[in-house]
Image (tube, grey):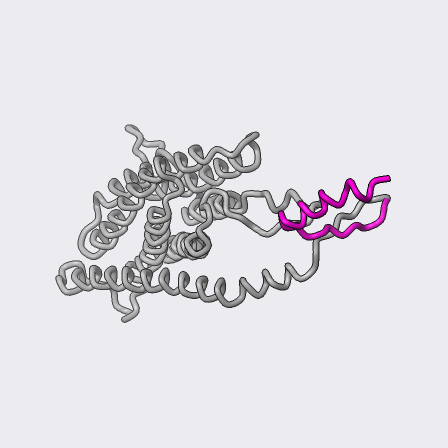
């Protein structure tokens, strides 16, 4: 992770995950739906019906974590070695091992999601939320230790990242007691967007500056502008979240009623495998039911 790619790819994954969560949360807020069990259109039951029940978020975490683990191990010539052979032995590559631990946590969190949604007899939301909270508690400890030898611009960049992780940890902890709270989910989504975008920005600041010249650790203006860029990220991500909500609301109010009308033109049918097709009659009003009940004795032989 101590490279440009090592910052951009994890940041891109977190940012895309935040965009997906923004769409899900916006839909739940507009239609007043549940965040834990969102309603979805009925699927055709058949050979591939179980594919719709797979935890794709969990699988994506496992795949992304595995790729990042392989990338981190490949960045070190000869692979990661824990200790050297000198006397006394010394630990090697401390930051790389911390990066590897972060990616292992991501993959393990994906395993928890898949286990909860697809392997257990009943989904355990507390297990999913608790696993994610544990990941961020460990991540916060790793990041605090990660900046022990950092100074100047690098210290400022990682300190702001630690701030986002700390706030996200607090929100996820609160969700253990209120997992279906919309305002907490909206805040969590915003913080995931912030964490992803700032991690990508950190790659450009530390390894590929836009000016082509490295940032100066002894220049106070460079350190101040790091905080200014962070504030710009706050505004841009807030506008991004608001824009997703606005687009989702526009789509729901303009296109969703039309699809409902198209789906309700005909009466539903019941088809038996060996018999004819029957059309279900519309529901009868209470007054009509009374009239039919009065006519039944007269029509009986």
- Judge left or right: residue 261 versus residue 107: right
Q: In terms of depth relative to the viewer, which is nearer, 283 or 204?
A: 283
Question: Residue at position x 37%, y 52% from top?
Answer: 189
Question: Residue at position x 63%, y 49% from top?
Answer: 287
Task: Please determine whether, in this image, residue 106 is positioned above or below residue 259.
Answer: above
- Judge left or right: residue 10 versus residue 113: left
Where is the C terminus found, in terms of image quarters? top right
Total marks drawn? Answer: 0
Question: Residue at position x 28%, y 43% from top?
Answer: 143
- Judge left or right: residue 273 versus residue 65: right
Q: Position of residue 4 (x, y in %)?
A: 36, 58
Residue 9 in view in this figure: no
Q: Position of residue 96 (x, y in %)?
A: 36, 43
Q: Position of residue 2 (x, y in %)?
A: 34, 51
For residue 50, what is the image quadrant?
A: top right
For residue 201, what is the image quadrant?
A: bottom left
Extreme residue toward the front, this view = 298
Residue 74 lies within the magenta run: no
Image: magenta residue range: 275-301
Question: Residue at position x 64%, y 59% from top?
Answer: 264
Residue 128 in view in this figure: yes
Extreme residue toward the bottom, this view = 211
């Amino acid at each position: 992770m101590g490279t440009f790619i090592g910052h951009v790819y994890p940041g891109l994954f977190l940012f895309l995950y935040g965009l997906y969560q923004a769409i899900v949360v916006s839909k739940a807020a507009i239609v007043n739906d549940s965040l834990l069990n969102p309603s979805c259109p009925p699927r055709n039951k058949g050979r591939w019906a179980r594919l719709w029940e797979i935890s794709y978020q969990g699988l994506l975490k496992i795949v992304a974590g595995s790729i990042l683990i392989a990338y981190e191990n490949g960045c070190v010539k000869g692979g990661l070695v824990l200790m050297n052979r000198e006397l006394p032995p010394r630990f090697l590559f401390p930051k790389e091992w911390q990066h590897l631990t972060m990616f292992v946590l991501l993959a393990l969190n994906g395993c928890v999601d898949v286990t909860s949604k697809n392997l257990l007899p009943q989904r355990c939301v507390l297990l999913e939320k608790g696993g994610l909270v544990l990941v961020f508690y460990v991540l916060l400890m790793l990041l605090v230790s990660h900046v022990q030898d950092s100074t100047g611009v690098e210290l400022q960049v990682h300190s702001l990242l630690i701030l986002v992780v700390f706030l996200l940890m607090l929100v996820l902890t609160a969700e253990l007691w209120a997992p279906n709270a919309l305002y907490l989910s909206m805040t969590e989504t915003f913080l995931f967007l912030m964490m992803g975008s700032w991690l990508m920005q950190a790659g450009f600041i530390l390894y590929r500056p836009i000016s082509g010249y490295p940032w100066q650790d002894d220049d106070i203006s460079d350190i101040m502008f790091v905080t200014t860029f962070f504030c710009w990220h706050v505004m841009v991500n807030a506008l991004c979240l608001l824009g997703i909500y606005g687009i989702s609301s526009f789509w729901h109010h303009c296109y969703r009623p039309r699809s409902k009308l198209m789906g309700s033109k005909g009466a539903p049918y019941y088809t038996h495998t060996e018999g004819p097709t029957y059309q279900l009659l519309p529901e009868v009003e209470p007054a009509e039911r009374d009239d039919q009940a009065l006519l039944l004795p007269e029509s009986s032989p």
